[in-house]
Image: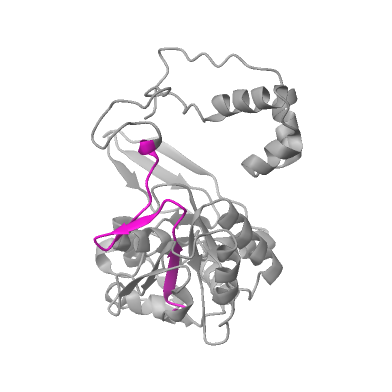
Amino acid sequence: MTATTTPTPSRNGKIMLVGIGPGDAGTMTARAREAIQEADTIIGYVTYIKLVADLIGGKEVIRKSMTEELDRAIEALERAREGKKVALVSSGDAGVYGMAGPTFEVLFQAGWTPPEVTEEEAEDGSIRRIVADGIEVEIIPGASAINACAALVGAPLTHDFCAISLSDLLTPWPTIARRLDAAAAADFVVALYNPKSGRRTQQIVQAQRLFLRHRDPATPVAIVKSGYRRRQDIVHTTLADMTDCDIGMLSTVLIGNSNTFVRHGLMVTPRGYANKYEVEGSKNTREGEKAGRSLSTGLNGWQETVRAAHAAGSTIEALAAEYRLPADYIRMTIDEPVLDTTINAEEGVEA
């Protein structure tokens, strides 16, 4: 059956929160292009409007400045109340440091609730989607800077990672600093958004200082400026030298973890196969390891090791220091009952 959409029998319009990706047409999703083309009104930051200029001919266009996010959301609500379809555009993904959050805040404050959406099957087998009275909101995902920049430099996100914005315009610096320190200590690959601006020049220096408390100065770092745009620039450097590089508001800084390496100009974070398998290209597991089962140092094996070490005389404090984990967590691990971890053969297995 094919899906078709009926005209919305509503006095109100629709807000489409459109993530346009890095900025070039090739990385924008088909749905993002469709949403912009079907919209009556386009709202966005002036730079983002320029990135979709080929799609907005003949439409009402409302351009806003960098710090006018709430104004954009309010404009979108007002136009939707007039019955218009509104495309509120964000670079990257609208839900990642984008316009989705501010828009929902404005909508909820205005008393908005999602309209009921139903589907009916027509005689020809097609599905009609019917939206009840009210303003509909659709979130259209796009590739965020962390994805786009990672693709340009190699495969730095193959293991656990996080994103932290260095903008302290809305977030207190101590909160940002605690997140930086925790992520550095936990050995995450980290993407720094909004790393530096004309007025915010020291946040990136402070971030480097916090990371150097936990990471080797030679840790690989990639700085991507204007990824997939006309003035794209990529620099490979190290944690020790990254603040000597050209970094601005159009830059994303990718900091590797303790295993990340650079080879032939590609930044790669290993997934961890070497912990289980003997050599590259071989399916032979290392001694004590089994394919499709947790590592011997996985949760179950680690719990057994901790309990055995404590029974042999190691103190909780010593074990906490060894594993860099809270003492109360070590204590709970020792005290909790041993569970049966037998896995059914029918269950799916991982690598």
Q: Position of residue 99 (x, y in %)?
A: 52, 66
- In percent of the image, x 65 and y 45: which residue is there? 324
Q: Position of residue 7 (x, y in %)?
A: 39, 53
Residue found at the far bottom of this picture: 198
Quarter holding the C terminus?
top left
- In percent of the image, x 63 and y 76: which residue is there? 169
Depth check: 175 or 37 in front? 175
Would you place residue 39 above or below residue 260 in this image? below
- In percent of the image, x 52 and y 48: which residue is there? 132
Depth check: 44 or 135 in front? 44
Question: Magenta span covers which residues?
Answer: 247-274
- In percent of the image, x 49 and y 26: which residue is there? 296
Is residue 172 among what the camera can see?
A: no
Is residue 3 among what the camera can see?
A: yes
Would you place residue 282 above or below residue 57 in this image? above
Q: Position of residue 261 (x, y in %)?
A: 36, 56
